[in-house]
Image: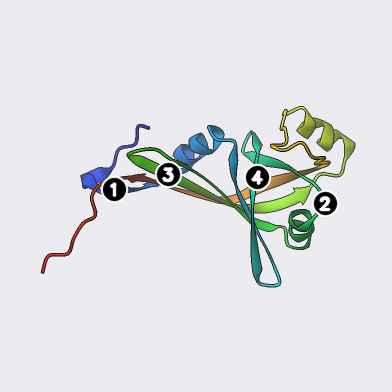
Amino acid sequence: MMFEHADGNPILNLDDEQSWKLIEGTTHGRLVVTVAGEPDIFPVNYVLSGRTLFIRTAPGNKLAELTINPRVLFETDGILSDEAWSVVLRGTARVLEQSAEIAAAEALGLKSWVPTLKDFYVEIEPTSLSGRHFQFGEQVEREI
C-alpha cells in the first residue's frame, strides 16, 4: 500500500477517501450490533453500491438485533507482513422490504460464504467513517 506516514509515525489516521478505497477493495468484515446494552459481533461478507454497504442474512440473532437497534458498527481490516489497516464505519441498518430494492440488491451479485439460505438483504447507510494504517516495526522501549 502506498500511504505516507509523517515524521516516521507508525500510525496514520486515514481520510475518508483513503478509508473508502480500502473498504472497496475488501469483501469481508465484522458487523457489531447492540441490544439492551449487550454488544454482539458477526463476521460478514459484503458488497458496496456507491457509499452504501449491503449484506445478506438469514433469520436469527443478527437480523433480530439490527431490527431492534438499527445503529451498527462495521469494521474491516487487512494485515500484511509489514503493515496493517483498519476501517470502522458507523451507520444505520435497514432490512430491505420493497421488491425494487431487493431486486437492485440482488443485482449487486452478493453471494453467501456458506451454502445456506440468506433471504434478507440489509442496507447499511454510513453516518461516519474512520480508518488507520499501521507500519510494523520493533517495539519502542522507554529510556530509563
Q: Which residue is the site of mark 1?
A: 10
Q: Earlier in the sequence, mark 2 or mark 4?
A: 4
Disc 3 from disc 4: Cα separation: 18 Å
Question: Helix, strand, or loop for circle 3?
Answer: strand
Question: Helix, strand, or loop for circle 1?
Answer: loop
Foreground tag (3 vs 4): 4
Amino acid on which the number 4 mark rests in the picture: Val
The residue drawn where x is 40% and y is 43% is 84
Question: Helix, strand, or loop for circle 2?
Answer: loop
Which label is found at residue 59? 2
Residue farthest front in this picture: 115
Residue farthest left in this picture: 144
Disc 1 from disc 4: Cα separation: 29 Å
The residue drawn where x is 77% and y is 27% is 107
* Residue 15 picture location, percent across and down: 43, 43
Amino acid on which the number 2 mark rests in the picture: Pro
Q: Which residue is the site of mark 4?
A: 44
Q: Is the C terminus in the top left, top right, bottom left or bottom right quadrant? A: bottom left
Disc 3 from disc 1: Cα separation: 11 Å
* Residue 52 picture location, percent across and down: 65, 40
Give the number of marks: 4
Foreground tag (1 vs 4): 4
Disc 2 from disc 4: Cα separation: 14 Å
Q: How many residues crowd mark 1 within 10 Å: few (<14), some (14–19), many (20+)?
A: some
Which sits in the foreground, 73 or 80? 80
Amino acid on which the number 3 mark rests in the picture: Trp
Disc 1 from disc 2: Cα separation: 42 Å
The residue drawn where x is 67% and y is 47% is 125
Q: Earlier in the sequence, mark 1 or mark 4?
A: 1
Q: Which residue is the site of mark 3?
A: 85
Disc 3 from disc 2: Cα separation: 32 Å
In the rendered view, does 10 fall on the left or right side of 14?
left
